[in-house]
Image: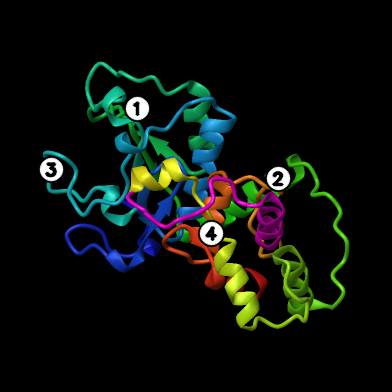
Amino acid sequence: MAHPSFGNGWPNCARSNMVTLVRRDGLRLPVHRELADLVSILMDLTELAGGYNIVPSWTWGFACRAIAGTNQPSNHSWGTAVDINAPVNPRKRPLTTNIPRSVRELWKANGFRWGGDYKTSVPDAMHFEFMGSVADARAITARLRRFLSHAAPAPRQRTPATAPGEKGRIMELQRLLRVAPDGAIGPATVSAMNRNLIGWPPEVRRRTGRNVSLPGNSNPNLVRWLQRQGRRKGYLMTVDGSIGPQSNHLIVVVLGQADAICGANGYRAAVR
């Protein structure tokens, strides 16, 4: 069972505690809001450092249910468990898995229990469940962010804004948008923001049913500006000018743009 700090599980699941983690590959994973950042980081490390590809249609999170074949609440009902690549990591005996040991140890070292280690029940190789409290999740996430910030290359130096604070950030953005840099978000700036949308490339939007017209390649200077705002807000990411899983997570989770597109409202959220 999940720690009490995560709220209620099955049969009285606290659905209001759930958020949807959105990744560029199309995965939409509902998990507890206090675990979303940690799960996002571990999934990125699973693929980038562990070399193990996560298949969106084979990967699941929150489900308000009991453990299969029992009346005991599943950790999925708290949103504190994820199943990764279920068809090739089934719940069965003998243990059957293609998840590398390094990936399993990565999750276990950061607060999760792996279902393949079950001794008193059927091994569940797809299953990772968080064993700590909300406070533990926050502390582990902060530790990972500190570690990765030291490992990541330092962002390139930028010309300082000509005004301090939010006004300076708006002026820098306005220069990139090719509008008068007055430091205020007026009609001309809003129009330019909505002409220079940042979001998923066309092939991802088609797969997810999003039909908003966007350029195939977002302006890398604007993307770098957006990534710098994400770092300023405490979100660890590489400033590389490309739209990838980190940029998509920044737009959806940090800036609160549920459609995964940064237009006028997204830019406004970024400068604050």
Q: Residues within 10 Å of mark 1 (few under 14, many from 20)?
A: many
Q: Callout 2, which amino acid?
A: Asp
Q: Which residue is mark 3?
A: 70
Q: Callout 1, which amino acid?
A: Gly
Query: Residue 129: x percent and y percent?
Result: 37, 43
Q: Is residue 193 above or below residue 10?
A: below
**Residue 213 - label:** none
Nearest-to-viewer mark from 2 and 1 = 2
**Residue 251 - label:** 4
Of marks 3 and 1, which one's residue comes earlier in the chain? 3
Q: Is residue 156 above or below residue 96?
A: below
Nearest-to-viewer mark from 2 and 3 = 2
Q: Callout 4, which amino acid?
A: Ile
Q: Residues within 10 Å of mark 2 (few under 14, many from 20)?
A: some
User: Is there any visible trace of residue 261 in the rendered image?
Assistant: yes
Check contact, mark 2 vs mark 1: CB within 8 A: no
Q: How many marks are shown on the rendered structure?
A: 4
Marks 4/1: CA–CA distance: 35 Å
Residue at 71 percent across and 49 percent down: it is 239
Local SS, label 2? loop
Of marks 2 and 3, which one's residue comes earlier in the chain? 3
**Residue 173 shown in magenta:** no
Local SS, label 4? helix
Q: Which residue is mark 1?
A: 116
Q: Residues within 10 Å of mark 4 (few under 14, many from 20)?
A: many
User: Is there any visible trace of residue 267 in the rendered image?
Assistant: no
Marks 4/2: CA–CA distance: 15 Å
Local SS, label 3? loop
Q: Which residue is mark 2?
A: 240
**What segment is highlighted magenta in the picture?**
209-231
Query: Residue 189: x percent and y percent?
Result: 65, 76
